[in-house]
Image (cartoon, rainbow, N blue to C red):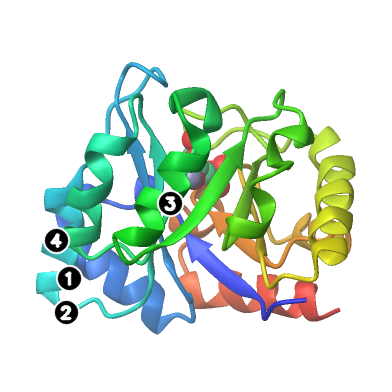
Amino acid sequence: MQSTVIAPSILSANFARLGEEVDNVLKAGADWVHFDVMDNHYVPNLTIGPMVCEALRKHGVTAPIDVHLMVQPVDRLVPDFAKAGASMITFHPEASAHVHRTVQLIKASGCQAGLVLNPGTPVEVLDYVLEDLDMVLLMSVNPGFGGQSFIPSALEKLRRVRGMIDRSGKPVRLEIDGGVKADNIAEIAQAGADTFVAGSAIFNAPDYAGVIKRMKDAVAG
Ligand code: DX5
Ligand code: ZN
């Protein structure tokens, strides 16, 4: 099992002062920055692109930036995000014509690669590519918006993917995204996640450090 990572989704941050928000959440104990890219095509919302990622790097952010691509097609944006300072890039198999090729493209660009499974996407999509991945991201909401409720069937899916990763013997991270809160993170961790995205639970709280500590304590049990 990998070390615990808390990755606040900046989708719920105040975009008018994004650099400061990211500084504050990292000072408060966050490990990564989760960066949601939406294209109003693959998902019905529009957010931020490589320029904003680059701006965060220029601002001085050194923490890993976890770029979650909810875009179709995928490949064209990979080199741009790698140049902009992405540490890892995850994408949805439904949005790529050639999943294996996209994984190799991300790795060749110098980033870690991850595949994202929507609530309705079967885990079998991981067959034949799991061993090439650095991370699997399970969505516990349908992608497109922050602030939705955790879909309970994600727990069973986490247990299944945890088993697949353990059997592979590879150091693949298992990330969960959507509706993660301080009061459900313990059972999510018990189901096998080691990397936790949380947007509204952190950025809508008055005290980022307090929520992140409660989350880490709950995972540690
Ligand atoms: C949804 C995004 C999530 C979202 C999570 O499509 O991928 O990262 O920001 O937000 P919360 O934690 O509020 O569900
Ligand atoms: Zn996300």
In this picture, is 96 found above or below 176?
above
Residue at position x 50%, y 77% from top?
Answer: 209
Contact (Cβ within 8 Å) of mark 2 with mark 1: yes
Q: Label 2: few (<14), some or many (≥20) within 10 Å?
A: few
Question: Which amino acid type is shown beneath numbered disc 4?
Answer: Glu
Quick one: label 3 or label 4, which is nearer the N terminus?
Answer: 4
Q: Is residue 192 visible?
A: yes
Q: Amino acid at mark 1?
A: Arg
- Quadrant of the image containing the C terminus: bottom right
Residue 91: where, in percent of width, then height? 46, 40
Q: Quadrant of residue 83?
A: bottom left
Circle 4 residue: 54
User: Mark 3 touching mark 1, by CB under 8 A?
Assistant: no
Which mark, residue 104?
3
Graded by Cα atoms within 10 Å as few (under 14), some (14 to 19) or many (20 or more), the crowding at tag 3 reads some
Pointer 2: what residue? 60
What element does badge 4 sit on? helix
